[in-house]
Every structure is written in C-alpha cells, then in structure tokens.
Image (spheres, rainbow, N blue to C red):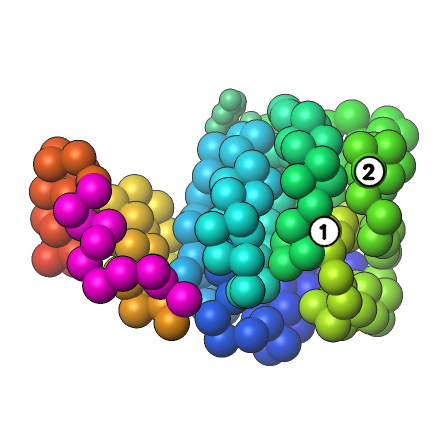
Amino acid sequence: MKRADCLEFLASCLPEHALVATSLSVNTALWSQLRPRGPNFAGLNMGLCTPFALGMSLAFPNQQVVALDSDGSLMIDTSALITVADARPKNLLVICFDNEYYARMGPTPTSRGVNLELMAQGAGFRDTYAVRNLEAFQAATRSTLDGDGPSFIWAKVERERTRILGTRHTYGQAMRAAFVDALHRHPDYPGQGQEMRTLPTHARAEILTAASSDVDR
Ligand SMILES: Cc1ncc(C[n+]2csc(CCOP(=O)(O)OP(=O)(O)O)c2C)c(N)n1
Ligand SMILES: [Mg+2]
C-alpha cells in the first residue's frame, strides 16, 4: 500500500474545516501538496504530532482532528497514546503510517515485530484498525470519520524510494503563519483578533513577518 494513495483518499473525504497535524516525515510533504490551505500544522518533530493533535481536538471539540503520525515519530513517545485514550476526544483520529523506517535512515522496531495497534489498544483505544491495503484503509477511514473517536489506524505502507518535496508552506515560519491565518478564518475560532493580542510580542512579529514573505524553507 502506498502512503500517497491513502492520503489522497483522506484528503477527498475530510471535512472542509478539519484540523490536521503532520509528523516530520513523508506525511508532511505529501499532505502539503494535497491540502495546501486550511488549518494544517506541518512537520512536528518526532513524538509531537499526536500530542499536538490532541490539543487541537480539545480546543476544537466540534471539528474533526487528524494526527498524521509515522512509526519513528510515534515510537519516540508512545505515552501519547495513553494520554489520548485517557482524554477520550471523540473527534480525534490518529493515523500512524508505518513504513518500518526512520525516513531513509534505517529500519525501526516495527520491522522487527512491534505491533502499534496492540499498543493503542493497551493504552485504552477502543476503535483501532491495522490495515495493509488501500481498500481496508478506505473502510477504516470512513468508519472512523462517521463514528466516535478517539480512533487509531495503523497503516502499513511501502517505503518511499524517492525524495518527496513539499510546498513553500511546509516548514518554519511560513507554515506557522499559514496555520495561524487558517485558525483566524476558522468558523469555530472563538474571537476575532483575540489570539494576536495574547501572543508574546516576538512571536507576533515573527508571524507577521512570515506572512508577508514568500521565502521557501
Ligand atoms: C528527537 C529527534 N531525533 C532525530 C531526528 C531526526 N529525524 C528527523 S525525521 C526522522 C525519522 C522519522 O521517521 P518516521 O517518523 O517513521 O517518518 P517517515 O519514515 O514516515 O518519513 C529522524 C530520525 C529528529 N528530528 N528529532
Ligand atoms: Mg517511518
């Protein structure tokens, strides 16, 4: 199963205002091409994708939230699964794309038998799926988007052989500025302009600079 096909399907059925976090992985480059606009926080460092998505799911309880995590990233902090299952956000779907590799750096423990679905179940997830082909991925995704979460999909995918490049909004300041801008426009956002006043001055300046720049990162 190819991760690109899974993500293309997800992009086709995800609600317009869904919030998405991606791990620092192939997920980030692919997702930025499939959904260049909208509330996407991309390229979270290892271990941080699922916790960040949990935060968004609690902040936006009436919106679908998806963590596009990956094997190396999730395994650096599997305790995130416990925190999610314990918090029980109905609107959170965690998808872990498992290519059994740390990007192109070497095999991860899932190549030697680690079962991430069992870990999610042990953490307390009741809605879990292990999928190895596109049809199963599509069925699991439909089911999780229709029902109550938190849900976990362990998606076994082929290792990408070539480097996949993202868009200019994939990383760094430009990505963060696009994300904040998308939150401002989000129908569930609590207050017009409120967030800019509560941000520290240096962060506000950084976002405004990035928003007016076309620099690729
Ligand atoms: C704490 C930390 N250790 C190492 C790295 C270097 N690094 C960046 S991405 C990556 C591998 C990510 O693997 P995975 O999450 O499985 O992504 P994928 O295979 O889908 O690209 C590593 C080791 C890092 N960014 N942070
Ligand atoms: Mg991997």
Q: Residues within 10 Å of mark 1 (few under 14, many from 20)?
A: many
Q: Amino acid at mark 1?
A: Pro
According to the image, label 2 marks what residue? 124
Give the spatial CA distance, label 2 vs label 1. Answer: 10 Å
Q: Quadrant of the N terminus?
A: bottom right
Q: Residue at x 12, y 51 (%)?
A: 208
Q: Position of residue 79 (x, y in %)?
A: 68, 26
Q: Is residue 195 magenta?
A: yes
Q: Residues within 10 Å of mark 2 (few under 14, many from 20)?
A: some
Q: Amino acid at mark 2?
A: Gly
Q: Residue at x 76, y 67 (%)?
A: 147
Q: Position of residue 86 (x, y in %)?
A: 71, 36
Name which quarter of the figure residue 166 lies in. Answer: bottom left
Q: Position of residue 129 (x, y in %)?
A: 85, 53
Q: Is residue 182 magenta?
A: no
Foreground of the two, 164 or 122: 122
Q: Quadrant of the C terminus?
A: top left
Name which quarter of the figure residue 77 lies in. Answer: top right
Q: Residue at x 43, y 57 (%)?
A: 40
Q: Which residues are magenta?
A: 188-198
Name which quarter of the figure residue 9 lies in. Answer: bottom right
Ligand 1 within 8 A of label 2's CB? no
Extreme residue toward the front, this view: 190
According to the image, label 1 marks what residue? 150
What SS does tag 1 mark? loop
Q: Considering only vertical position in the picture, is 188 above or below 197?
A: below
Count how many numbered circles sit on residues in the image: 2
